[in-house]
Amino acid sequence: MKWIFFILISVVSCAQKPEQTKAEKTQLVSSTDSIPNSTIAGNFSSQTELRFDSARIDSFFKAYPVFKKYSSDYKKFYSNRKFAYAWHNEQGLIEQSSILYNRIVQIRDNGLNPDIPYEEAYKNMMEDASLGLSTDRELMLTGQYLVYASKVLTGLSESKLKEIEWYIPKKKTDYASLLDSLLSGRKVDSAKLLFPQYYQLRDKLKVYYDIEKRNSWVTIKPDKKKYEKGDSSPVIREIRKKLFLSGDIANNNDSEVFDEELSKGIKEFQRRYGLKEDGVAGPGVLKEMSAPLSKRIEQIIVNMERCRWLPAEEDASFLMVNIPQFKLLAVENGNQTFTSDVVVGKETNKTVIFKGDMKYVVFSPYWNVPQSIVTKEIIPGIRKNPNYLAKHNMEYYEGGKIRQKPGKNNSLGLVKFLFPNSFNIYLHDTPSKSLFSEDKRAFSHGCIRVAKPFELAQYLLRYDQNWNEEKIRAAMNSGKEQYVTLKKTVPVYLVYLTAFVDNKGKLNFREDIYSRDQHLKEMLFSQNPPANK
């Protein structure tokens, strides 16, 4: 299923070299048409006649102890094959062994460090034509595959994910079964082994590595705070070059004058970076254009890692909120139903990253005020003004708790959407509509405010014939709380992606509002930074 989550457009920023060809320019703005396999491609031999003694596996681990952590995968794989060679046939090594070797050598394309275990021994085994039918080489190839698959398909451990507060359950991958399936010749759709965004980001990473290799990245160095229509400056010519190479403008007239065409290109740039679309190259635009190439490469790699943790095949119908993008998307059977701007938690009240199941729509809701807000805001308010509760349409209930009554000024607005979870996070309407006009919308206490609550209610109740447009609007404005149980629960993903590819094939970047990229980057790059080798 084509991934259609992200709808905003972004840019590949780079500067034009005079000697660039038209083909080179096109490469910078076009995504790769095909999605390369993340595993080993080809028709594998299914030979079963050549076998080895199972005891050789334990002796191999003594010589190459790094692979011992995969002992259960080894034994499961070879037991299923009755210890028949998988990488050899009567003529020697099969073609897939070379394909695997090339994949491992090029693992940097997957945003991973090229630290190959026992690299020299592995290379020697692959190049030694005299080895013939070698059990050590056979087991080395399997070990290298398992390491590769673990890195590419799995990423960081569950414990590491909890350390960085990512609570969406990781997908489970049976590497031994996968390898057995590949080598037996059974068809495996490797494009479904990872979350679809992973492959799209990987294509963009290759483009950025190419920019790095050709040293064609130019950083904008502004000589004023902003540029707008009518201005003239050599910096404007450089801005124009970047917009042309990234596809924001169709033509580059090399002018130093800020014209209407450039203003439209700036709006495209702003849309892809989540900035206010005013067509002015102000501080936000200039800051993003001035980012070093290394930052963008790291940002892509960090988000490729996050994509390793997400389900490979998303549910047929689901809701997803990308927190740094401040966007909600509803998808039904692969088709985008609608998108909505959202407000998420501020830095001190971060919205949690997790998956839930939407079960209830609550019309005209009460707002049961959390004790933390009661302590920090309401009690001090009552001390200053004894009529504080009445003024805010609040009341005591259940032995001293405080809640706000339903109504248009209720903090939850006219409807809320519940997917029960231990974090007490939900989606809801809000009377504070003005916040949706901000380009950065981290203002809440952790819950998610939705700009289009009526459309969301329609989407969630689409299977219930008891609810049409008229009844939904009436319930939202009734002033009487009403719970509605959904006929069919809907998965909800709250994710955190600061780099992603939209459905037009354009790369987007967003600000790391919770400073989560830095922590993850340190985990990934602490020992071996992603330098070009």
Image (cartoon, rainbow, N blue to C red):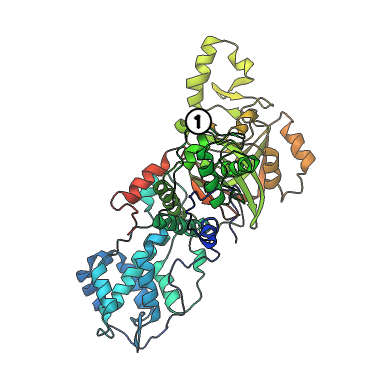
Residue beneath label 1, please? Answer: 225
Q: Quadrant of residue 140?
A: bottom left
Vertical side of 268 occupied by 440: above or below: above
- Residue 54 visible in the snapshot: no
Q: Where is residue 166 in the image (x, y as percent from the top left)?
A: 44, 46
Question: Mark 1 belongs to which amino acid?
Answer: Lys
Q: In which quarter of the image is residue 22?
A: bottom right
Q: Where is residue 73 in the image (x, y as percent from the top left)?
A: 35, 69
Q: Which residue is drawn at 39% across and 46% down?
A: 162
Vertical side of 433 occupied by 321: above or below: below
Instruction: Quarter of the image for the N terminus: give it.
Output: bottom right
Q: Which residue is drawn at 55% across and 34% down?
A: 227
Q: Where is residue 363 in the image (x, y as percent from the top left)?
A: 68, 35
How many residues crowd around disc 1 within 10 Å: few (fewer than 14), some, or many (20 or more)?
few
Residue toward you, 106 or 78: 106
Viewed as shown, does residue 231 lie left or right of 455?
A: left
- Residue 379 visible in the snapshot: yes
Instruction: Quarter of the image for the C terminus: give it.
Output: bottom left
Viewed as shown, does residue 426 lie left or right of 50?
A: right
Q: Where is residue 433 in the image (x, y as percent from the top left)?
A: 65, 30
Q: Residue at x 44, y 42 (%)?
A: 291
Residue toward you, 318 or 121: 121
Residue toward you, 481 or 319: 319
Viewed as shown, does residue 43 lie left or right of 436?
A: left
Looking at the image, how many numbered discs can be counted on the residues?
1
Vertical side of 353 occupied by 475: above or below: above
Disc 1 on helix, strand or loop?
Answer: loop
Residue ranking furthest to the right = 470
